[in-house]
Image: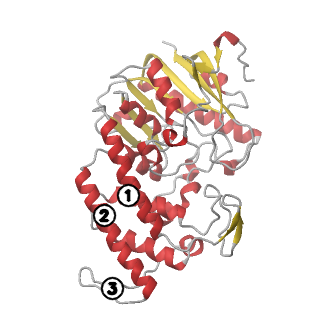
């Protein structure tokens, strides 16, 4: 049976006077620079990572995140001069993290983003007016096709044409992954969905609808060009902002399964061990992490590792699902222990309403030092259900 942690002297709702709800942190601060380079359902806010890294780690330390997600821990560690590595099962999530943390030739990146934007704008104008447009590589414009049922279903004809053209042009540039992230973000916004439900739409919308967000009747989205334009410029601004704040600390993104990955097999690993972990594992039965980016998997044909997700929403919250989740989480931390220093500090951000993490700590040879509780007040979901998280502070024994 799970143990209940009752030592109230080790329970806190703030750290050094900082309210962990971060209710006074404005939205643009929560999404500063590359933290909003691409939407990601379920990520924690950077201020939460920052305050704990500042308090418990120091410049030059090595921080590990075995559930990297979109790379928030890696970005914040770098800004504090801490080296970091993140492990993630999703190929697309790794792409997001790579693009967030990459050091760019900013002049070249801007040149390429502008150039592909000009080309796609001209193609869009050709679609709008049906005129013969300028040629590139001695080829006239033509309509494009995809065999993807998903793409053909979830986008208007014009939006899909603009998306497919931009995708076709990406191969002509050096910063291909950066351009993919811009296009993926635009593709997400250009789906035939309501303005108020970008996170979990269930079906395409092709008729006028009453918009809860705008409090009026709205039309389904009919183009991708405005999003491609908006996010192209926004991406340039964000990578420039991070470039001005980043340090020379090392960042490593690793695609793999944290339950069995071996750092000794990873190129560049020199055998050193990590000072600690800051991570947020999946919450049992809450999110299907691959499915939230289905548009990107369909567009770029990435390998789908959804069958390897831990605690996906599709498995539900049955007793057997919770047991499988617990077993998998234990496997992750036991495997990570091989790469942690003695007395390493482990911080785990989780909604532990089933009180299973004290048992996980015991199985992984961790001592519970403290538990922080925080209400999550600023959410991307439309529901008003109360939601809270715990930040477990463990120390590896021995």
At 32% across and 71% down in the image, what residue appears?
118
Look at mark 1 in the image and give the residue it sits on: 233
Q: Is residue 326 left or right of residue 255?
A: right
Residues packed near mark 1 inside 10 Å, few (<14), some (14 to 19) or many (20 plus): some
Q: Residue furthest bottom?
A: 131
Judging depth in this view, the residue of 376 and 288 nearest the camera is: 376
> Residue 144, percent across and down?
43, 81
N-term mark: 2 or 1 = 2
* Tally of numbered tags: 3
Look at mark 3 in the image and give the residue it sits on: 133
Judging depth in this view, the residue of 355 and 223 nearest the camera is: 223
Residues packed near mark 3 inside 10 Å, few (<14), some (14 to 19) or many (20 plus): some
> Residue 132, percent across and down?
34, 89
Judging depth in this view, the residue of 360 and 38 nearest the camera is: 38
Look at mark 2 in the image and give the residue it sits on: 114
Q: CA distance from mark 3 to mark 1?
A: 24 Å
Q: CA distance from mark 2 to mark 1?
A: 8 Å
> Residue 363, percent across and down?
61, 22
Q: Is residue 132 left or right of residue 302?
A: left
At 39% across and 34% down in the image, what residue appears?
85
Say if residue 362 shows up in the picture: no
Residues packed near mark 2 inside 10 Å, few (<14), some (14 to 19) or many (20 plus): some
> Residue 120, percent across and down?
37, 73
Q: CA distance from mark 2 to mark 3?
A: 19 Å
Find numbered disc 3 in the image and state the secondary structure of the residue it sits on: loop
Q: Is residue 161 left or right of residue 391?
A: left
Q: Which mark is residue 177?
A: none
N-term mark: 2 or 3 = 2
Find numbered disc 1 in the image and state the secondary structure of the residue it sits on: helix
N-term mark: 3 or 1 = 3
- Residue 335, placed above or below residue 104: above
Q: Is residue 31 left or right of residue 381?
A: left
């Amino acid at each position: 049976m799970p143990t209940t942690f009752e030592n109230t002297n080790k329970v806190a709702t703030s750290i050094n006077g900082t309210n962990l709800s971060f209710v006074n942190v404005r939205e643009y601060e929560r999404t500063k620079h590359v933290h909003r380079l691409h939407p990601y359902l379920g990520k924690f806010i950077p201020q939460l990572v920052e305050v704990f890294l500042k308090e418990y780690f120091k410049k030059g330390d090595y921080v590990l995140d075995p559930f990297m997600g979109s790379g928030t821990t890696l970005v914040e560690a770098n800004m504090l001069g801490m080296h970091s590595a993140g492990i993630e099962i999703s190929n697309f999530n790794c792409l997001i993290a790579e693009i967030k943390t990459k050091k760019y030739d900013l002049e070249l990146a801007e040149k390429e983003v502008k150039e592909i934007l000009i080309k796609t704008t001209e193609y869009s104008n050709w679609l709008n007016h049906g005129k013969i447009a300028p040629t590139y590589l001695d080829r006239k414009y033509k309509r494009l096709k995809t065999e993807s049922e998903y793409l053909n279903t979830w986008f208007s004809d014009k939006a899909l044409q603009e998306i497919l053209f931009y995708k076709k042009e990406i191969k002509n540039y050096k910063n291909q992954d950066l351009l993919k992230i811009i296009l993926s973000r635009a593709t997400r916004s250009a789906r035939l969905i309501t303005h108020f439900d970008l996170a979990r739409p269930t079906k395409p919308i092709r008729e006028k609808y009453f918009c809860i967000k705008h409090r009026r009747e709205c039309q389904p989205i009919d183009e991708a060009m405005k999003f491609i334009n908006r996010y192209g410029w926004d991406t340039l601004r964000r990578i420039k902002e991070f470039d001005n704040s980043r340090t020379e600390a090392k960042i490593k993104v690793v695609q793999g399964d944290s339950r069995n990955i071996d750092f000794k097999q990873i190129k560049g690993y020199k055998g050193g061990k990590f000072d600690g972990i800051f991570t947020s594992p999946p919450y049992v039965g809450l999110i299907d992490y691959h499915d939230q980016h289905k548009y990107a998997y369909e567009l770029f044909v990435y390998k789908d590792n959804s069958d390897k997700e831990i605690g996906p929403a599709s498995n539900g919250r049955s007793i057997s699902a919770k047991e499988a989740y617990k077993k998998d989480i234990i496997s992750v931390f036991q495997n990570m222990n091989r790469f942690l220093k003695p007395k390493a500090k482990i911080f785990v951000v989780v909604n532990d309403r089933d009180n299973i993490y004290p048992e996980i700590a015991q199985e992984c040879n961790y001592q519970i030092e403290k538990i922080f509780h925080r209400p999550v007040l600023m959410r991307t979901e439309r529901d008003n259900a109360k939601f809270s998280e715990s930040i477990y502070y463990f120390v590896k024994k021995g």
